[in-house]
Each structure stands twice: as C-alpha cells, then as structure tokens.
Amino acid sequence: MKKILKLSICTAALVVAMIGCTKLEQKNYSAIPASAIGGGSGGIDAVFGDAVGGAYGKLRDFVRNDQWWGVNEACTDECIVPTRGNDWGDGDKWKDLWFHNFRPANGAFFESIWDKSYAGVAACNNVMSDFAKGTYNSLGTSPSVIPLAQAKAEVRALRAFYYFILMNDFGNVPVIIETTTSTNPSNATDPNDANNAQNGQRKIVFNWILDQLNTAIPDLATAKDNTTYGRMNKWAALALRAKLYMNAQVYTGTPRWAEAEADCLAILNSGKYGISASFTEIFGNKNEGNPEIIFQIPFDKIWGKGMAMQMMTLHYNSQGTFRMAASPWNGFCTTGDFFNTFATGDKRRDQTFLSGAAYYPDGSAVKDRGVPFVYKTTVTAFADANGNNRDQGARGVKYLPEAFTSDNMSNDFVFFRLGDIMMLLTEAKLRQGVKDISFVNQLRERAFGNNNNAITSANLTLDFILAERGREFAWEGWRRTDLIRFGKFQDARLFTTPDASNKTNIFPIGVNTLTKNTGLKQNPGF
Amino acid sequence: MLPAMMRKSAMLLLAIFGLTSLALSQTQTVTGTVTDKKGEPLPGVTVAVKNSIIATSTNAQGAYTLKNVPQEGILVLTGAGVVTREVNVSGNSIVNADVETSVGNLNEVVVVGYGTARRKDITGSVAKLSSASFNQGSVTNGIEALQGKVAGVAITPAGGDPNGKATIRIRGIGSIQGNSDPLVVVDGVQGIDLNTIPPTEIESFDILKDASATAIYGSRGANGVVLVTTKKGRSGAPKLEYNSFVATEKVANTIDLMSPSDVRAYFAKNNPLLDGGASTDWVKAISRSAFTHNHSLAVSGGTDKSNYRGAVTYFNREGVLLNSGKDNINARLSINQKAINNKLDIQLNAIYNVSNRRFIDYGSDITNITVSGVGQESLNPFLFAYSMNPTNPIYNSSATNPYGGYFQPNQYASQNPVAFLEQIYNRGRENNFIGSARLEYSLTRSLKVFVFGSQNKINTVNDFHSPTTAYNTSTGYAKKGNINEDNLLGNAGLNYRKTAGKHIFEATGVYEYFENIKDEFSVAVRDLRYDNVRSNNLSLGSTVDQGFPKSNKESYNIVSFLGRVNYNYEGKYFLTASVRRDGSSKLGANYKWGTFPSVSAAWTISKEGFMDGTKGVLDDLKLRVGYGITGNQNGITPSLSQKLTGFGSPTLVNGNVVTPIVNLQNANSNLRWERKAQLNAGLDFALLKNVLTGSVDFYSGKTTDLLYEFGVDRAVFDGVDKLVANAGELTNRGVEIQLNSLLIKRTSFQLNVSGNISFNTNKIVNLDGEASDRFGATVKLTQPNRVSWGSIYGRGLSFSNVTFLEPGYPMGTMLVPHFTGKDAQGNPLIESEDINKFRRFNPLPKFTYGFSISPRYKNLDAAINFRGSQGGKIYNGTLTNLDNEGRLADGDNVYAAAVSHGFKKPQISDYFVESGSFLRLDNLAVGYNVPVRNISVIKNVRVFAAGNNLFIITKYKGTDPEVAADGKNLGIENINVYPKNRTFSFGLNVGF
C-alpha cells in the first residue's frame, strides 16, 4: 500500500512537471522584428532614413571593378584591363570584356550588375509597399519634415534609376514592382524579331521608366543643398530623363532629341547648378558640395565603403606615393591611343590620367623589381606572361587617391553633372540641325585655362562631340552608352577587330541568374 | 624421566607436527566474487592457484570457493574474454577481484542512450573503446585517442594548431551545410566540448552508429552519438595517481621550396635587382620545436556505499608557429553515493576548466582591415612564408623603417610572416564550468525513477591587438570581446524491468528539457594613440570602428519525450523499439515538433540448439537488424526561421549618417531539421574460443530535408539573395568490418591485434526544396545542375571552383579541365574551357582502415597503430600556386621543381589532381611497468615513450593528404593549409 502510494505520488509529480514545461517559444532578444518598422494599421512617425535610407544605400554597390562601373568601362576604348603576369587573368573575364566576347557561362560580372541593381529595386519596392499600406504618418522631425508625396516620388525616381541601369546594360528586363506576385517574372524577348529583338520588349521597359519619371518629377524637391545631397531631387530626375531621351533611338528605334533638349534646358535654367571652377574638385575626397554635381553616390571611408577607384588602377608600389593603407591592385589603365586624344595644353589629360615617373613623398624614385618605376602610356600586349606590361598604361586618377585608405575612399561617385548636361544639350541641338558652341567652349576654357582653344561652328560635328565627351567624361561610366549611341561600339580598338554583329550592344544574362529565375530568356545572339 | 634419545625424537616429532600443522594452517579456504570493471559478476572465470593444480570456476553469480590455498599464494584469473589477472591472497579468506573483459566480449557493459546494457543484449550497432586501448602519447583531445580504432568512425585530427578542432564523422558525410558533427554526451551532459575533459580522466567511449541506437536522441542523433564515460571512484583504500608527460613536436612536412641559394642564382641570371641580400628559410623562421607538458594528480577511493574521484590537471602546449599555444587547468570531482538501503543512488560531477589560448590570426578578427590581394580567410602565415622571397631579410633595423624593426617587402600580396605572427596579439581566455547531478531511486524491485540535471557555463574573453607598426594596420587596431553561454539540461524518467521465467521485459520513459542562452559583447577601436597597452584601454583609440560597439543575445530550447521498450526471450531473441518526440524552438512555425521512431531486433544464433556442435570454433554469433529515423538540427541558428530586419547600409540624410532598417532575412515557417532514415544489419561473432571477435555491419541511410542555402532572385524574395531552406536528398551506404583478436595469451606474453575497414558510398540525389516568397506563398526552389562548392584561391586565380554539388554524384565531386601540355611561352594548356568536357574525380575515399598491434611481454608493452585511406583524390591548390616559374619574376619563391617544369602562370587543371591515399603510422608507444614490490607507498610505476605521426606512406606531393573531412575544403588543399606535426613524448604514471 505504501509502495503504491509512493509510486503514485512520484508518477504524478513527474507528469505534472512534464506538462508544465512544453513551451517552445523562440525568444528574440536582439533582432528587430518586422513589426518594428510600420506594417499593420495605424501609421507611424518614422525617421526618413529608416524609411527610405535602405533604398539609397544600395547605390554604393555599383562602382567597383567587378560591378557596374568596371564592367561598363573595361569594354570601351578608354579603359583596358591587361593581364599583367599572374594578375588580372581572372578566368579571362577581362579579356572577354575587352574583345567583346561576352559569354553567359563566364558571366559573373553580368550577374553582379543584375543582382545589385535588383537589390536596389527590391529595396525601393519594399518602401513603396510601405507607402501603399499607409505605414507612415510623417517622415522626419520638425522643422525638417519631408512631405509624404515627395518621399514617394523620390523612391519612384530612384527605382527608375535602377531600372535605367538594367535596361541600359541588358535591354529587356522583367519589371518587378511592389505588387508583382509572379515568382518567375519573365522578360520574354520576341525570338522572331531577330535584329531589333533588343528593342522589341526593351521599348516597353523604356516606356515604363519614362512613365515613372513623369509621375515623380512634379513632386520632387527642387533644392540643391544638404537636404537633397545624395538624393533624387527634381533636377537629378530630369537629368535621368534627359539621358533616356538622348538614347531613345538606341532603346526604342525612335529618336527624341527635342524632349532631351527641353529637359537639359530646364536644368540649366534652374539656376541651381554651375560649372565648378576646379575640374579636380568635382571628383575630390571632399566633393560633397560641388556646384556642378547633380546626382552623386556618397561614399565615406568609415560608414560608406565601396569606393575603390585608386586600388583598381594604381601600381602596387604607388601605395607609398599616395600614403595608402594597402597596396593597390595594378589593373585598370587607358590605351595609348586614348591618352593621345588630348591636345597639348589640355589640363584634363593629367587631371584624369597619371603617367611618367613615380616618386615617393620624400622625392626618391618608386622601384619595381629593383628598377625605378615609370608609368608608360603605351600598352604593347593584352597579356604578358612575364609581367613585363606591369608598368604600361596611364592610370585613372580622376577620383583622387586618398591617404590612409584603401578600397574605402571618401570621394563621392558622380553620376550626373552639369558639364554632361551641357554636352548633351549641344549634341541634341546639333542632331536637330542647330549648332551651339557656347557650352563646349565654356568647358574647354576650364580645360585649357584660357580662351585660345575655343572651337568654331565648323568644328562642331558629331565626331567632335564624341571625342570631346571622351576627353571630358573619361572614366565616369558613360563611355559605353555614348559609343553605342554614336554607333561606334563595335569598332575595332587596340588588339581587336570589329565585332561581328551588333548583338554586343547589350550584355548577356549570366547563367546563374537564369537558374534563379526560370522565367528569363537569354538575350538574342548569346 | 624420558631418556635423551626419546626426548630428542619427541621434540623432533613435535617440531614436525608443529611444522606440519603450521604448514597445514598456512593453507585456507578462499572464497570471493569475480566481477567485471562495472561490478557485474562474471560467470565462467577460472580461478587457480599459481603454480599448482588447485583451480575452480566462478558460478553464475561470479562466486567461487577454493580450498587449500596457501596464505601467501597468488590467484590467477583467466577465462574466455577475460584479461588474465593475478591477485595476491595475502592471508585473506575473502578475495574479490575485478577483471578487464577484452574487447568484443559479449559480457561487456556498454552505454546506450539513457542507460546501459550488456553487449549481448544489444540490437543496434554500438562500438566501445576502453582506456586501455586508447592511443598513447601526447593526446591533447580525448577523441584523438580513438583515431583509426573504430570502423565507420573517421577522426581527422586538429593538426598542428593547438587551438584547432578535430572532426569526427560517423558513417560518411550526412549533411551539406548543416554541420555533420555527432552529438557528444559526457556522463549524461549533452553538447560538451571534449577539450574540457582531460584524456587521462576518460574511462571509455561508446559510439552509437546506427539509427536504431541513436534514434533515442531524436533530433540530435542523425550524425551518430559519442557517449563518453569519465573515470569514477572505486571502493577501497584511497588511491593517488600521478600522470604526466612531456612532448616535443615539429612540423612534419611542408612543400619543397627553392633554397635561398638557388633563388639567388636564378635572380643573378634574370634580375639581380630582386636579390635582397639575405638568406632566409621563411618556413623555418616561423616555426619552432614546440614543447608540451601535462601533469595530473588524481585521488580516488571509497566504500561500498560511496566513492569519489577528484583530479587536477595542468596542460601546457606550445604551438609550432611562433606566438601560438594553449594551456589549461582542469579540476574535476565525481562523487557516487548510495543511500536508503542502497535504493537511492546519487551521482555528482563537477568540472571546472580554465583555458588560455594564443591564437594565430586568420583574418577573422581584422574584418575591417583590408589586406590587398588576398581574401580575408587566407591571412595565414604559411601563405606568406611559402611565397616570400628567400633573399629578403627578416629584420630591418634602419631608423626610418616604420614596421617595428621588421622588413616588409612593400610588394603586392606579400608580407613578412614573422612580423605577422609576432606583432599581432590575439588571445582568448575561457572559463568552463560543468556541473551535473543524478538521482536514481528504486521504488520497487522492478521500478526505478531517476532525475538528472546539468548546467554548463562558458565564459570567454577575447583580446586582439594589431600595432601601428604592423603592415596591415598603420594606425593600429584593438578589440575586446566577451561571450557568455549557458546550457541547461534536465531530464526525469522511469525505468521498469521485469523478469518472468524466460521473458525479460524492460521499459524506459523520459522527459527532457534543454535550454541554451548566449550573449556576447565586443568593441573595437582604431587610430590608437598609444600601442603598448593593447586592448586594455580602449579609450586610447580615437575612432570606434564601424559597427561597434556591438552586442547580441539569443536563446533556444528543446523539449522531448522519449520511450523505449526492450524484450528479451531466453537471451536468444531480442526486440527493441523506441520513439522520441522532439520540439525545438529554432524551427519554423509549421514544423516545431517531430517524431523519431526506431525498431530493431537481434537473434543470438549461437545459443540455438543446432549450433551446439560449433562450440570451440564459432562461440558466439548474433544477427542484428535495425531501422530508425533521426534528425539533425546542428546547422540551424536560433533565428533562422524568422523574418528579421536589421540595420542596412548607412546613408546620408540632411548631412547626417543614418543607418536604415532593412529586411535581412525572410521568414521560413517551413524550416525543419534534416531527417535521416537508416537501415542497419550486422553480425557479431566470436571464433576459436573467443580468440577472434568482431562484427560486420551493412548500412544504408538516406538524409532528406538537407539544410541548404539557395541563391534566390532578390526582387522576388524581398531584397535578399540567399535563403536557407530544407532541400534535397543525400544517401550514404556502406560496410564496416571490425576484428579483434587476442592472438597469444600467456601469462608472460600477450599479443593483441585488431583492425577495421570501412567502405562508404556517398551520393547527392537531388537538391530540390521549397520556401516562402514575400507574400507567404510556397515557391519551389531547385538546383537542377551543378552548384559551385569549393574553390582555390591565389594570385591570378581569384577563387576558381574545383568542386561541386551535383545530383547523382558524391558530395564535392571534382571537375577540372584536362591538362594537355604547355606552349612555348610557358602557358599551361587545357583541352577545353567547356565544363562538360572536364575530367571528374571523387574526393571521398573508397575505403578507410586501421590496424593495431599490441604486444605485451611481462612488464613491457607496446602499441603500434596504423591508419589509412584509399582512393580519394585531392586537388593540390598549394602547388597550383607555387609550381609557377612566373612568380620568380615578381620576386616570389616557388616550388623547388618550378623552374624545371617551366609554367609561367597558374592554371587549374587535372595536372594538380593527386591521389590522396595514404598509410600513416599514427602512434607507436612503448611502456614499461617498473616493478615496485619493495616500496611500500608506491603501488605501481609506469613509464612510456610514444611517437605520433611517425611516418606516412603516400604518393601525395602536397603538405599532407588528410585535408578537410567535409565542407567547402573537402578534397582541396589550399595554400594556407596548416601542416601536421610529428610528436615525441615521454610519460610517467605513478600510483600511490
């Protein structure tokens, strides 16, 4: 009896204990649950940065050698990445770019552009759906509250910007917005439209981007100051739209020069921008407030990393010359032909490209393999197994190297600047039959430091404009777009023969991208 | 009055009588019980008086009675499956003895999940290794004592790094990204780091290999379970043990490089300006002969009712690389107490371990410092030491040298490895406390109730400092961090055992609760104004590094119900079934609970009547079959199933830096554990009067719902491009054979030989899974073709993939282009760049094996342990980089034969795929039991000498053919590999 009693008590105790402890609650101590940022009924008063900042942060993934900038530059006449001994072989990726042998199977670069651009799109979509849900009552704290309509317009314009990058590089891309439900959104290129297949669906994307900009522009802020630094204001959106119109013939088959001209004029006449007195300051370490910059991507050596221009281009031992934190990678340079397109006295040449002997701050010569080092301007071979081409090619120092940094420079990357708008205006007018040399000569006055190199109307031809754009905007990321617009992208360059077809006007989609989204079809010809 | 003659005879008679009676009274009857080491009585053991014919056998209760035993006689205990033992009678009339049972003996007691059983009653595949069979010598981690000894258990040693980890893999690779470590349970405490248990305190390992044995551990048992039993007290007078050893180790093998003089000659012909003027063997410069010493003092004793064991161990190991090493102090106490008429059994264990570690920095701490040209994970001094120009000096004492007296080459991807090791300060201190208590009460004769609770508290402090004179940190960097972790385990259950005639029935039911809480904190600063205080005064750093200070806290818990029933008829037919129901908070909302059943049966064929004629040849034969389902949740971090938002990239708003809140991770309410179903069939046998024992096991296992990280389309999945989901199917099939034999078993000479061989075939069947998109709808994810897995890095290669995950092939299948020769400029040529024309190789071996020979002659004993692997292929990334004459032009050092091969640039190809087969002499140990009969205090003295990794037979030209067991470096040697060491040790054990 006693035993049974003892038995029952023990069993009972155990059972009670067991039932009591079956809770399986996953506690979240440090992560922010989704409910913290809006969502649900009843809007919140959010800090602007919390709400929209994430969409802008993605812009910093565009300017490295293996991202949008490097890929769009290394296939043009102004930028070449030779294989120097054992460096920059990289599975022939740079060779493929230079020789326009775009291969989907070797498509890590194309996947990178696609991926980073859609990351930006996704971030914008997130914000747009927050707006649609009525998540926010207000953004910012008084007195700097940002109207909701303006914030929404900013995000719309920013998303249009990401799509511009995608369309410019890949032609036809799936348009995914905050209400898209398909998990394999398609870009269905019309296979029957062989030659203009790129334009077939590309036109639809183009029109959609235009539509987005048209909706956004009226609501955007018009200031150019701290409140719109690094952000989409009305003028940045207009500049983007101007670029769309300028290249409309490439994207859709129909030119739209007049509309481009109108947008450029609107920016010029706004009175907000002016030509920077110093060319180099536009791209310097502290170029935040430069009067010429319309839209830039802010970088900072501590909180905004990703600007690695100095690393990509300078020779290893230039680390000492510029007191950098690490040894550069000795890759990107320009060809001798391009270097020589600058006339004597054109200061832009040496402000853009570094050539000649290299020295340490104390005056002693930089040495490479024991020999005093000189940056030579002629590139004699694409690949040299012995690395004898290590010192070849003038290097791009437009984005001035910064002491004590490596791949985290503080120079903001300039996307749109007034000089570009001026040249586009000149070009748009020329293509409509009107010759206006005033803007070109303003830029040339800055370039030469005097008025002795002004051009005449007779000089103003399309060829001249392309060449002058090369000199003014070298290494700013627009060369590929310009060459395609002028129909010169397929021309032969150093070591190459002309492209067999103009399929190279767009990049192929990388194989890994195709695997992730089975709705995608490869671009024609690849 | 008797005449003198009569008196003399009378005295003589008396004397004779006296003597005789004296002699007669010097023999006696001796009784006693013979038990095994667990205290279980052993029947059938022969008890004989040495050098006489007086002998008997123990009965079914292990008891014996011997008459006419001389008082100073010696009893010799022998028998089938028993290690011969001699015991002094010393005038006692009751002489009890415990003897060791030899491996494989069916009376052996093995530990199974939540209980113990006799080997003869087991239906699953369990391997047991006792301390007598452990590898001897400088064993730094208990698990290395098992290397090569158990079929199906592959132990890849930690290698030369004193802070490295050994990996244990049971029956192949069971998981792709989910962590294939088995569950380690020490005296009932789950999930302990074996480094906290000194090897001298380990009594035995019991390894549960097949699913029917591990299913009782449910969602943590899929990779096998290693049950560790530590030494406990024993009844008797207090015994004091002193164990110590000293060891010296050196790097066993590195790549042959060109010597400084050869390089000098080459430079003289090609570019004299590259000659730095010195002659430095960089690999020698960064390594040294390292010393280890270990001392431990243990005291144990007790009575029938209670016993105890306490031990203090001090261990200090220098690393072979400069400025590296580890030392720790460990104290443990184990108390066992019986009370209330022996109905209550109390076991208490406590361990306290303090470790001081001196790490080699592998770049993981300098996450915010960029080193040009190499990826973060390849910051390793061997990488630099191999390629550094041997004509460069180590030091540069010029006054203008900013690098603290070290020479730095100011050359791409090259830096002084001696400076790297000596300048960087990277230390950790870990305090680890494990306490556990177990109470077992016999309610009735058949019913027991038990309660167990344990707590494991780990506190780690890390300090890191890189000075302003270091090449990578011109402004200095200092970091300090703290991690606290707490693991709580409690279980309670009932055990019922009833014998009814020939039927024996046993049932166990347990409830278990486990909780883990971890919180961490760290701060890092740069721009140090003063270096020498290192990380002790972080306010001297002008800038707080981005992302700091940071802290994090997370926890999870697991609730389980488990039950097992055993049925045994006449000791011939056995049936076991178990089921476990686990709930884990880490998993997705739809799958928090899972059920893991198993069933197994066994038949002791040798007990059948028709087998009677085989006795003497086939003594024991038992057939086992089992099937079970187990789970693995090792790879799941606490918040993996939830939607998480956190800080994204900072941006500038109105001139201020803001860090926005962005989506970091999508919810996955379908996240569940990996699930493994395994069928096992085995045969245990004993032949030739138990001289040869062994087992053969066949198994076939299928793992589904593998944890796998899919690359996904960002726009569809809310901005993230990676998603961890359950996907795919993986199979492992194989055969294991284990043989042990006591070939020669005389009193003065014994020879024990054992061996094992394991075959395993691994195959990925598919990688298809599903997840939820941003609207919550289910999306199918597939990886139809192959996915890149492991890669080689190096200058000019920048991460080239050589291994892949491909459905239909084993994990890590290797695909490389075919080498066809080289052209006139020295460029290596390959057949085609089309991956479909690549050659395919398998990094996993066809079979692995081990064998041990242990002779014993009187007081001298030796153990020779070999281990080998046959058939796997390795991609030699080190030679891909170093067999490259082109690098000499840059002033880098190269492979000794590079100039004669004449390659001018690196190229991934099958030229660098080599056979990874090897046979290694893991361990050779010789010991001597010094005779100490005359010294009263000292009971036994043993000295031994041992060597580890004495030699290896292999065709592999790289550093060492034992590369990673799984993960991304499976089948790959990358240039930063840490070489293995060769160790010589000498030890002394004294018992008081």
Image (spheres, coloured by chain):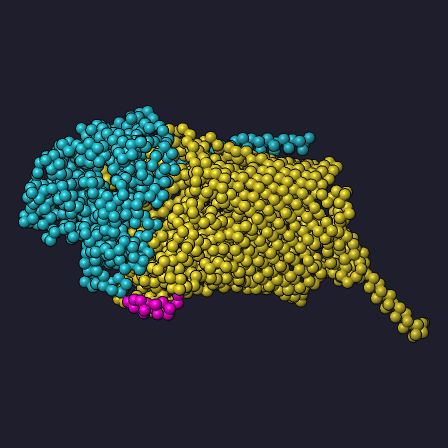
Position of residue B24 in the picture relative to residue B230 (left or right): right
The residue sitting at 20% across, 28% down in the picture is A214
- Rendering coords of residue B560 (x, y %): 54, 35
Check the image and name the residue furthest to the top.
A41
Query: Can you say whether A261 is above or below A492 in the image?
Result: above
What colour has chain B? yellow
Q: Main secondary structure of the magenta part?
A: helix
Position of residue A206 in the picture relative to residue B787 (left or right): left
Q: Which chain is cyan?
A: A
The foreground one among B874 and B851 is B874
Magenta region, residue range: B258-273
Query: Can you say whether B209 is above or below A377 in the image?
Result: above
Q: Can you tell which quarter of the image residue B399 is in?
A: bottom left
The residue sitting at 17% across, 46% down in the picture is A470
Query: Can you say whether A33 is above or below B370 in the image?
Result: above
- Rendering coords of residue B631 (x, y %): 52, 38
Residue B269 covered by magenta stretch: yes
The residue sitting at 33% across, 66% down in the picture is B392
The residue sitting at 76% across, 61% down in the picture is B50
